[in-house]
Image (spheres, rainbow, N blue to C red):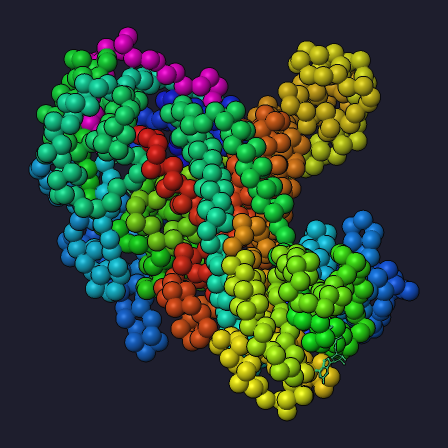
Amino acid sequence: MGRIADKTGINFKMLNRSKGPAVWSPRSQNDRELYSLEAARVVEVQAGLAILEESVKSIQVLDNKEFGNVRIQGIVTGSGELIQCNALVLCAGTFLRGLLHTGMSNRPGGRFDENPSLGITESLENIGFKSGRLKTGTPPRVDLRSIDLARTEEQPGEEDPTPFSFSTEKIINAMVPMYLTHTNERTHAILQKGFDRSPMFTGRISAVGPRYCPSIEDKIVRFADKPRHQIFLEPEGYTTSIVYVNGFSTSLPEEVQFEGLRSIEGLENVTMIRPGYAVEYDYFPPEQLRPSMETKLVDGLFFAGQICGTSGYEEAAAQGLMAGINAARKVQRKEPLVLDRSEAYIGVLIDDLINKSTDEPYRMFTSRAEYRLLLRQDNADRRLMRHGHALGLVPDAMLARLDAKEEMIREGLRFLDNVSASLAPMNAYLESRGVAKTLQKERLSELVKRPGVLLGDVLTVDGISSEEFVVRLMHGTPEKLRKEIIEQIEIELKYRGYIVRQEQEIDNFKKFESMTIPEEFNFEEVRSLSSEGKEKLSRVRPRSIGQASRISGVVASDVSVLMVHLRR
Amino acid sequence: MPPFHPDTIVAIVTPLGEGGIAVLRLSGEEAITKVDEVFHGKQRLATAASHTAHVGKLLDDEGNMLDEVVVTVFRAPHSYTVEDVAEVSCHGSVFIARKILESFIRRGVRPAEPGEFTKRAFLNGRIDLSQAEAVAELIHARSDSAHKASLQQLRGLHSIKFLEIKDAIMRLCGLLELELDFSEEGISLIEISTTEKIIQELIVDVTQLIDSYKVGKVVRDGIKVVLIGRPNVGKSSLLNSLLNEERSIVTEISGTTRDTIEEAVHLSGYYVRVVDTAGLRATTDPVEVEGIRRTEAEIEDADVVAYVLDAGRKDIIEDGERVRSISAAAASQGKSFLLLANKIDLIGGELGENLTNLSGGMAILPVSAKSGKGIDSFRKTLSDLCLSRDYHLEEKSVIITNARHQASLLEAREALCRALASIQARQSNEFIAVDLRAALRHVGEIIGNTTTDDILNRVFASFCIGK
Ligand SMILES: Cc1cc2nc3c(=O)[nH]c(=O)nc-3n(C[C@H](O)[C@H](O)[C@H](O)COP(=O)(O)OP(=O)(O)OC[C@H]3O[C@@H](n4cnc5c(N)ncnc54)[C@H](O)[C@@H]3O)c2cc1C
Ligand SMILES: Nc1nc2c(ncn2[C@@H]2O[C@H](COP(=O)(O)OP(=O)(O)O)[C@@H](O)[C@H]2O)c(=O)[nH]1
């Protein structure tokens, strides 16, 4: 996905650049058409993969009464054919009994111009799955040619953007700017006139939507004192004139949307290609899943994506990756791969999903991660690439690159810890950076810790630049790899105190994660658990003491009691 | 399996207010070294063999003697918890025991959770399997009652203060973190100078709470009992009989006035000062003005007023007026009042009608300094009063009285200071937030945990963010 994003991106930005590296986050906007073509191509050329396209009508299981388990059997297609399988990943997005609302009119649908998927929810409910209803929305699309761009603020992408994938050397795509404008009080007044025909406010939609991407009507009501809201106009690609009106998600009647849009600066003469709408859909509360994304009820059935109550591309992709990996491992009779909260946001996401029953669409925030300072985008390869390689998903060459990088980082840290620069040239550098001079010879690792001092610069200082290690790094290493190595060393030095503390917290966390609870453990039998604890534990069936402690409703003494029992 | 909890914990393991000695138990890797740091005996504990007892002095942070103690060393795995254990037996005063407890906490030993020693014993395989359920129930029962107790302590002003602190940290955290998550919108939810100011204020608040940590007044100062009554009713004799059984640990305290004798006695771990209003002995007339003045001065200062009658005297009814006025005065000042009938050996142990008439329904404690009859009940009555006054005072005060709360607050303050240091070093939000999270966790140990969702809810409710 990272590679496809790098290839088809039309606007890149590293968010939070002004903050520390732990919260830098790469964002891209992609040519919609190119992205989907490239994604399809990647899937089509994948060796060992057969693609069948059909709509699915129901899920078929084998109820093996003798062994007391229920196993996946296959799917029944729209044309009535049963396709058998040993593992199935269901990822139907917003399609299950999807209902699209614009104003007081609604029609069944999964997405604009696509049919909903009927039958799957019922077939799963019959097996015993619980389902719920969520809502999300999308803004109207407008025509680029009808926008008065001069009256908006152009938002160019970043120059020389950082790619998503470690294997992308450089991004050379042509960039397309985005445009910023704002709603105003007149817009709000116009939209308010349509509130009596809002499916949200009139109770036609009862499902819960996400608070972190509220519809424009929600924003107007909840933050009545805000005179304006940001609107980002985002072209959908190089060759289309469709523009996504980000920030204007709405399900108001079409004519109200249109009038509202036209009151916005730059959109006075806008053509609306298609109105925004809200979509209501079925989801399966994710506490019904194991950490592997396999359902607890049906052996071999996995869920992923928006049907697990999440919203967003990354959230869906993360689950799809894990469900896919583990479905394959299931078939190969291998242990599932489970990432934990200290390894990856994927771990945080899945752990949150299965332990905390969400009643609004779940979105990832960096604040959801305890070990945020370690879960950085810059060290994703160092954290996860070995897993990928072991699974056969990362080629040997990439792993070799990682090994070389790790070795250089180690050498670099050792070098900086042992070497100090002569005073005169170092002070000349410090002075140029406006940093206080050093009075005695200081080890380079100490100097780099100072705010304002950059490792990349320090390595060019007279006397340092000629050291064997530095020569090898600066002249014998490909540019991108060199940048990565310098970045890793710099972060490790500058944030050592914080990093060490988080590592200690992780040790503590791992201790409890490693105390496993047997799959068949019967929580009902533990007399001294609190009744709420017992109920929640029985429902979620945690696999470790650590997991148990994160379930809402389970108190500290329940955890102690469990520990005592497990020691039996 | 290795022990799960390598950190060292401490608690007073004898029930407070019972028995003549108090025992503190430390368990964990540093149990023995932590005691060694403050213990001065013939031998360093570091070299002591398992199951050996050592007499010596326990010093406070300034090097002054806190108490003479006996330390028993148990080396892993031959201890209750299967970890290194040191038990410190000190004199039964709650005051001393808590002082010692505090000094260990200041040295980084963590106060034990309810039932934690037993839990460790179990986790380390010490306790028989069949006892698992019993242990589990114990943990639950103890933590329930501990929970209730701490809720009680957290009533009123306390809890409001804690909640304010928690809320302020939570809000800050939310603002700082969401600014990171929604940076695309280029919003600034809070100025860094405001953040700095709020953290500084939080540090002041938390410090105030930490400094307010005191053992209850009763525990610290003991209670003062004043014996009053006509000459020769047996006040000195009663005082002596209280002292007799406590000879070994009585301390002589010079009287505050030339005419009073004050003796201290340890009752059930409490420190009780008994004042014999000896000055009254010089006067022949009990209603003499000067006498009353002095008695009143003593009463003024006392927690418990014990009026002693001579059960053998015919004219005892003449005490009636004074008993009534003094007991009323005592009640109005929140003091306890006791009525003792001494010398009951002279009337065959039975309280006569004249006595019951005089008391007007008030309970009379029949005692005999001579035969020792009733002295035990007298002692028991006094120690019960200590307990109830101790509790009473702590509940009403706005101070922290729980060592675990104090330990959590100390940790919270450290985290807040680190956050402040990050701001001053111009680190960005995420670095400030890590330590605010840590502070929140520590405050949470006192008033309940905060989840990320709590934080998010807090902020989404008041800010318009998200596209
Ligand atoms: C217009 C729009 C804009 C969005 N913008 C953003 C954004 O900017 N950033 C962001 O992070 N998120 C965005 N989202 C949300 C994001 O697209 C979804 O959360 C994410 O794609 C969900 O992924 P998914 O794989 O679970 O489901 P989907 O991507 O919805 O995929 C479901 C697939 O299942 C197929 N399907 C369903 N039922 C059947 C059946 N019975 N038989 C066969 N196939 C079936 C569908 O055809 C579809 O291809 C947007 C969503 C929409 C609708
Ligand atoms: N029979 C009897 N005599 C007592 C008792 N208590 C004290 N006395 C005697 O009463 C006298 C006065 O006692 P003292 O303690 O000096 O009285 P005070 O003036 O109230 O302190 C002494 O002779 C005591 O021996 C008692 O319980 N029984």
Q: Is residue B154 visible?
A: yes
Quadrant of image for the N terminus of chain A: top left
The image position of residue A402, as x and y in percent, is 60, 38
Q: Is residue A37 visible?
A: no
Q: Is residue A141 magenta?
A: yes
Give the magenta part as a residue range. Answer: A138-165
Q: Quadrant of residue A306?
A: top left
The image position of residue A476, as x and y in percent, is 67, 24
Camera-side residue of A472 and B49 = B49
What residue do we see at 36% from left, 26% from top? A29
Q: Is residue A172 magenta?
A: no
Quadrant of image for the C terminus of chain A: bottom right
The image position of residue B256, as x and y in percent, is 75, 56
Camera-side residue of B92 and A194 = B92
Camera-side residue of B336 and A191 = B336
Q: Quadrant of residue B387?
A: bottom right
What residue do we see at 62% from left, 56% from top? B300
Question: Taking A536 as reference, is B165 left or right?
Answer: right
Image height check: is B133 above or below B88?
A: below
The single residue placed furthest to the bottom in the displayed view is B348
The image position of residue A264, as x and y in percent, is 22, 17
What residue do we see at 68% from left, 67% from top? B285
Q: How many marks?
A: 0
Question: Taking B10 as reference, is A38 left or right?
Answer: left
What residue do we see at 71% from left, 12% from top? A431
Image height check: is B210 above or below A488?
A: below
